[in-house]
Image: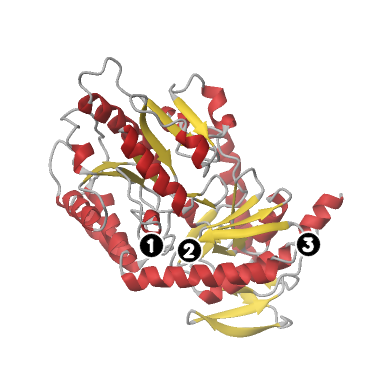
Amino acid sequence: MASLRVSPNPISQPLNLRRRFSPSLHGRVQLINGRRAVTACLSVDVEVPDTASKLGLAKSKEVIETEAKVVVQTYARTPVVLASGKGCKLYDAEGREYLDLTSGIAVNALGHGDEEWLKAVVEQASTLTHVSNVYYSIPQVELAKRLVASSFADRVFFTNSGTEANEAAIKFARKFQRHTNPDAKEPATSFISFTNSFHGRTMGALALTSKEHYRSPFEPVMPGVTFVEYGNIQATKELIQPGKTAAVFVEPIQGEGGIYSASKEFLQFLRKACDDAGALLVFDEVQCGLGRTGYLWAHEAYGVFPDILTLAKPLAGGLPIGAALVTERVASTIAFGDHGSTFAGAPLVCSAALAVLNKISNPNFLNGVSKKGLYFKNILKQKLGGNPHVREVRGFGLIIGIELDVSTSPLVDACKNSGLLVLTAGKGNVVRLVPPLIITEQELDVAAEILYQALPVLDATNSN
């Protein structure tokens, strides 16, 4: 990997480790969010107390080696052991600081350690954590009421994750068809999904996910799913059929697939085609919903509304929760015992979700996300657009993709080594940027500069 000199890279005092800076440090002291920080190039030595450094290195090595022995190896993890976080910053076991543009894969919308979120969690944990859905609980009903009031939906079904929310949508769609067509010899049971889609890893949601390498080791998955090109109206028109199609699943903005946004025309067509065929329209906003686009719900930007909306990632700010929001027309077909969950909608996670929703749904907060998204996309285009490896910078709000003509891996690694955490998407050729929604323009400037300074690694890697 090529040696990089990246500036600026703010290095500030971590939560759990004091640092000493060499007197020969060539940089400048500045305030970042009211904190004393030093802007410096990577070639400058930052002295960490030997004892703390050795302890941190030993701990990281131990964690990585132990994980390989006791955890099922389904994750090709980045070799970083994260120990703490605050705001948009993360710190590893050695005390190194990282600017987080991953948000735990679009989960930590309020960053790390938000005070109002923490207060809600601590207070609820000391009051009542879990009772199951055998009984009523106040936070669950309050959260459902808030979600209904802020969306197209009439009712909510809670789950523990995005894939579970999509499993619920699958079951609800089939039950809807059976209930509304009681005399049909064979009610509609098939589904339409799209290229580059990702809906989850459980067997039903997996069947709706287009990447074959996710599905093939576990086939046969749920039958009856047809994939069609994302955005292709004519091809989709031929597939949505009365008496055959139970539902169409679509992401208004595809995250895992490469940060592709649907057109308004395409979503409007899907709405009409589903209505004409008696099929349900399901919007999967697990990654793009809840403020990430600058709208509370991504579909609001299009003026097109679904029958079912699935969401999860940011809803409880890092605690596991998901939900399927449905119209009364759908909910009226679901009976006691048709679906359920032991953990879903527990008081603890619902209290956390209320704290998140209260903050994100504020119009001023959403307006800020829109402004920061435009700002970030513009500076990325200015800094990166002239590089021959950069094909496109695209996105909506604070879900942004940088498409390359080569693998993103060297760039992602170089960014990590320079104190910036980013994700990949698509076919491994898209850098995915999903920072906490609270990120500042100053932090976005730092991220853009690190990305810019890291770009030469692509030339070095591909010339070898």
**Is residue 64 found left or right of 280 in the rendered image?**
right
Mark 1 neighbour class, 10 Å CA radius: few under 14, some 14 to 19, many 20 or more: many
Q: Identify the residue position indicated by label 3 in the image.
A: 456
Residue type at numbered disc 2: Gly
Location of residue 111 (image quadrant): bottom left
Mark 2 neighbour class, 10 Å CA radius: few under 14, some 14 to 19, many 20 or more: many
| Of callouts 1 and 2, the N-terminal one | 1
User: Residue 405 — which label?
Assistant: none
Residue at the top extreme of this rendering: 185
Where's residue 17, x and y in %? 54, 67
Residue type at numbered disc 1: Tyr
**Mark nearer the viewer, 2 or 3:** 2
User: Marks 1 and 3, how far apart in space?
Assistant: 35 Å
Residue at the left extreme of this rendering: 136
**Is residue 377 found left or right of 336 in the rendered image?**
right
Residue at 19% x, 50% y: name it: 128
Along the line of sight, the residue nearer the viewer: 190 or 336: 190
| Of callouts 2 and 3, the N-terminal one | 2
Q: Is residue 18 visible?
A: no
Residue type at numbered disc 3: Pro
Q: Quadrant of the N terminus?
A: bottom right
| Of callouts 1 and 3, the N-terminal one | 1
In the figure, 457 relative to 18: above or below? above
Q: What is the secondary structure assignment of the residue under circle 3? A: helix
Where's residue 245, x and y in %? 37, 28
Residue at 23% x, 60% y: name it: 123
User: Residue 295 — which label?
Assistant: 1
Q: Identify the residue position indicated by label 2 in the image.
A: 397
User: Marks 2 and 3, how far apart in space?
Assistant: 27 Å
User: Marks 1 and 2, how far apart in space?
Assistant: 8 Å
